[in-house]
Amino acid sequence: MSQINISWLQWRQTFQKLGWNEPLPQQTWQRLGGGKQIQVEWNDILQLIHSIGWSDQHAQMLWAALPVDTASSSLAPASWWARAAGSCVDGLVLVIPVAVITGLGWLAANGTTIKQKYSPSTHLHSFDLNGSAASAIPVVLVALLVPLAYNYWLMNQTGPTHGQTIGKRMFKTRAVSMDGLAISKPAIIIRLYAAQGIVWLLGSLLMVAVLGFGGVILALLYALLWWVVCPMVDQFNRCPHDFIAQTRPVQA
């Protein structure tokens, strides 16, 4: 969404939707060059808003409210490979630190007492790390809040990086709403928790808890369907969490 093609009618309707009435739409349209249709970038909007003495927040409000030309190449679906690579980068940036923090938190709360068990029937050794359920609460909170902070803070940035994490920026993709507008704050949270967290992660854990080793195999197939097959067969390369949050990945 680096460039937006917009007509005068769309421009005026956008201002009306924001409650910014005449003569502001006409004046700002003329400052951008006028005509029947213009092409604007984020920097154009930022400079325009500053020229009338308004803040960056007003620029972000206008940018997010602008309708996007669905024929524009900026809304072409992100490729499966770009999306997968970006997810891997985010995993390295986010999952590994979270795992280290939660692991250290667990050890600090419970110590390093490990019991070894031997099963005569299987001739296998297993290990138990002692710990209480209460001591796991801070660990769970970290695992829940750190991904939210990471996604919410980065994807809610003002300007052309809106809708992007570090991985998305590196591979030039972004998440937008289905109508092409900037992804909303609720959608960021829904996408992360209601979709990925509850539907995918808890679904996988439930399979493992109920079915044991068979559940592990089923959970892996579930992940394959979620992250690989679904975006391959959808015309917008969406995963199920995109369907739930009403978002889609596009080229940036």
Image: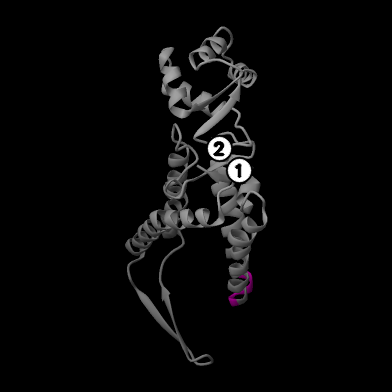
| Color encoding of the figure | one colour
How many numbered badges does the structure rendering display?
Answer: 2
- Mark 2 or 1 closer to N-term? 2
Q: Quadrant of residue 231?
A: bottom right
The kind of residue tagged 2 is Ile
For this rendering, which residue is in front, 239 or 151? 239
Furthest residue to the front?
35
Residue 109 in the image: above or below residue 10: below
Residue under the point 32% across and 61% down:
108
Where residue 162 appears, as percent x and y from the top left, is: 48, 37
For this rendering, which residue is in front, 39 or 75? 39
Residue under the point 47% across and 53% down:
86
Residue under the point 37% across and 76% down:
114
Residue under the point 45% across and 58% down:
88
Tell me if mark 1 has few (under 14), some (14-19) or many (20+) residues whose alpha carbon lies within 10 angstroms of its own: many
Q: Is residue 99 magenta?
A: no
Q: Quadrant of residue 182?
A: top right
- Say what secondary structure mark 1 lies in: strand
Q: Which residues are magenta?
A: 209-213
Instruction: Mark 2 and mark 1 in contact? Answer it, CB < 8 Å.
Output: yes
Number of the label disc, if any, that sits on residue 183: 2
The kind of residue tagged 1 is Thr
Disc 1 designates what residue? 247
92 left or right, relative to 235: left
Residue 21 in the image: above or below residue 96: above
Where residue 167 appears, as percent x and y from the top left, is: 44, 50
Where residue 111 appears, as percent x and y from the top left, is: 32, 67
224 left or right, relative to 132: right
Residue 232 in the image: above or below residue 8: below
Q: Quadrant of residue 99?
A: bottom left
For this rendering, which residue is in front, 36 or 81? 36
